[in-house]
Image: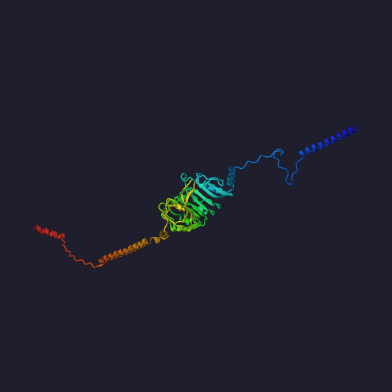
Amino acid sequence: MKYIVYILILINILSVFVKDVSSKDHHDNKGSSKSPPEFPPNLGPPPNFGDGGSKRPPPPPPPSFENTNNNTANSSQILSEDCKNIIDFFKSHNNNMLKIPKCCSKTFSRSHFINCKNGTITEIDLRFNVKSIQNEIDFSDFPIFNGLMSITMEANFLNKEVPPRFFEMPALQKLGILNSNIEKVPKNLNENSVVNEIILYNNSLLEFPYELLKYSNLKKLDLSLNEKIGKIPKEIENLSKLNELYLQSTGLESLPEEVFSLSNLTEFDIDRNPKLNAVIHHFGKKIKNCDFRYTNIKCYEPGTCENFCTGESDGNSRNFVKEDEIPYSICTEEILKESQKSFFQKNILLIILIIISLLIFVLLSILLIRSYRNSKNSKKDNLDHDIYVAPVLIKRESIVTVGDINDNNNIDNK
């Protein structure tokens, strides 16, 4: 019995101890749920999201490309002085007939856009329907954009000439006027322009634009589809840095020998010039791509071109073949020497005949003049001789008076 009592007392003591420990743990857990969490110094508690901090706000939606474009366009129109200037220009000149794209709006379009960098216009590509909009645009007061590097336009231009204003853009490197009404390039162009690429594709040029020869830094010149050009001046050699020269459908009848001094050419196109009878020889180094389709090639010097265009495929890509597949006749040394002669060397006999004809004409003219003078002088001498006039006898008739008549009457009466 004694041991049983001891065991019961020990059980009671253990039960009391277990209750105290469990109640202490429960109290600690309740206190932890009510006490605020500790934060690192200087950061403070997390923001209150309106629901006691128990819920986080939904994540923002991913930015859409369309929204980004609109925001960019709006901010550019608000902040960019360039955009204001170009919008005001077309509003004041076209009576809302010409629709321009959003300024500084990001786009993947290949045409009709205005691109910017940090609000500064860097590229202008405007394609207007020149058939439906007949009004000519005067670009003489077009805004000057210091960051503009490229202009491409289809429009009807005032006086049918390239606007000199474009050449006043201090950073302009590329100028393209396509499918428009251009007939001439004016003389008053800024000689200090840094333009190195000029495209006047499919216009109505009346002759080769000689004024462009002053831009010796040109690397690309495209005059294709201007069928009245007719000939290329020998001063083309001034454009010694040319990499690309396109003369498709320009009505060429001959090529000056100076063309073959353009040793930096990589693209040479004289396609669709049926009046041309060309001798093609080395340019100093091999040209990468040549296009001689629908053009009479008298002969070709091997090693002049690497690839020859045979046609176009889908899009703007062209098909090429290697030199060993072309059908052109090989130039002989005699033909090459003859083609490299100057105009006077080639036509020496003709020039001599012309000179002889002129001398004969002058001599005949002198003889005729002298003959005329001699005949005139002889007539004058004849008139200067003495003139003898035979004397004329004048018979004097008697004068009958009234008295004589009366006397005769009296005699008759008697």
Residue 395 placement: quadrant: bottom left
Quadrant where the N terminus sits is top right
Residue lying at 14% horizontally and 59% vertically, measured from the top left: 405
Number of labelled discs?
Answer: 0
List the single residue furthest toward the bottom: 386
Please provide percent x and percent y for residue 193: 52, 56
In the rendered image of this protein, does residue 294 appear above or below residue 19?
Answer: below
Please provide percent x and percent y for residue 204: 44, 50
- Kindly tell me whether residue 81 is visible in this rendering: no
List the single residue furthest toward the left: 414
List the single residue furthest toward the top: 1
237 to the left or right of 18: left
Q: Nearer the viewer, residue 131 or 79?
A: 131
Quadrant where the C terminus sits is bottom left
Please provide percent x and percent y for residue 384: 26, 67
Q: Nearer the viewer, residue 341 or 387?
A: 341
Q: Nearer the viewer, residue 8 or 30?
A: 8
Q: Nearer the viewer, residue 253 or 5?
A: 5
In the rendered image of this protein, does residue 130 appear above or below residue 219?
Answer: above
Please provide percent x and percent y for residue 143: 53, 51
In the rendered image of this protein, does residue 128 appear above or below residue 232?
Answer: above
